[in-house]
Image (cartoon, rainbow, N blue to C red):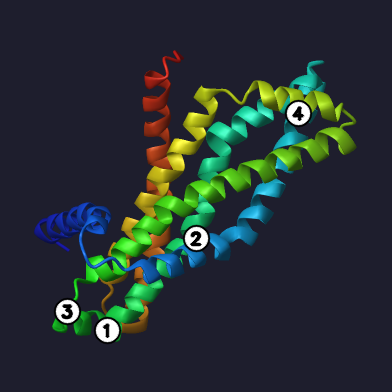
Amino acid sequence: MNIRENIARLQDFYILSIKAPFSIFRRPVYFRETIEQMDYMGTGSLFIVFLVSLFIGMALSLQISAELASLGMKMYTGKIVGVAIIREIGPVSIALVFAGRAGSGMASELGSMVLGHQVDILRVHGVNPIKKLVTPRVVSAIFMLPILTVIGDAVSLFGGYYISSFVSHQSGSFYWSQIREIMTYDNIFSGISKPFIFGYIIACISCYTGLSTRGGARGLRKSTTTAVVMSMIFIIVSDFMLTRVLLYVLGIRV
C-alpha cells in the first residue's frame, strides 16, 4: 500500500467521523435503528461490564490493601481505590471491553453487509449509508458507553468494599466515607467525560473498518481484528492526552 492510498483512507475516515455525528440533525431520523443499537451496545454489554468491573475492583483493592498494610496506611485503601477507578481504571477498562464486544460487532456486521452488497443496494435506492448505518451506531456508542462506565464504576467500588470489609477486615462505613470524600467535581468530571470521547472513537473506527471490508471471509476477519486493535490503541493514546488536558483545565499541577 503506497502513501497515496494511506492518505486517501485517512481522508475517508475523517469524512466519516465528521459526517456521522452531524447527520443526526438532518432528516430522515432513523430512530428505530438507533434504539436497536443502544440495546445491542448497552444491554448486550451489561453482563460482561458487570463481571469485569467487579473483579477489577476486588483485585485492585486486594493489591492496594496488601501494599498499604506494610506501610501502616491500610485505612486509605478506599480513597486510593476510588480515585483510581473513577478517574482512570474504570473508563479505560470498560472502553476496552466495549471495543472488544460492541466494536467488533459493528465492524463484522457492516463488513458482512458490504460483502453481501447490501450497502450498494442502499446507495441504489438513494439511501445515505453513513446516515442509515453509521450515525445510529456512533450516537448509540456516545450515549451508552458513559452509562456503562457509571455502572461499572459503581460495581468496582462495591467489589473494593467487599475486599476491604470481609477480606482485609476494615471498617465498611469508613470505606464509604472515603469514597464520599473523593466524589468531587474534578474526579467525577474527569471520569465521566472520557467515555464520550472513547465511544465516539470506537464507533468511528469500527464503522470505517467495517465499511472498508474487501476480500470475502478473510477480509472480514482482517477488518474485525483491525477495528478492535486500532480502537484499543486509540483508547490508550487518547486517555493519556485527555488526562493531560483535563489536569490542565482543572488546574491540577503535577
Residue receiving disc 4? 176
Q: Which residue is mark 3?
A: 123
Q: Position of residue 164 (x, y in %)?
A: 82, 33
Residue type for callout 2? Gly
- Residue type, numbered disc 3: Arg
Q: Is residue 42 left or right of residue 198?
A: right
> In the figure, 83 relative to 50: above or below?
above
What residue did someone put label 1 on? 118
Front-most of residues 143 and 49: 143
Name the residue at 21% across, 85% down.
Answer: 121
Q: Earlier in the sequence, mark 4 or mark 2?
A: 2
At label 4, counting other C-alpha atoms closer than 10 Å, the crowd grade (few under 14, some 14-19, many 20 or more) is some
Q: Residues within 10 Å of mark 2 (few under 14, many from 20)?
A: some
User: Which mark is first along the chain, 4 or 3?
Assistant: 3
Residue 100 image label = 2
Viewer-nearest of discs 3 and 2 = 3
Q: Residues within 10 Å of mark 3 (few under 14, many from 20)?
A: few
Q: Is residue 57 visible?
A: yes
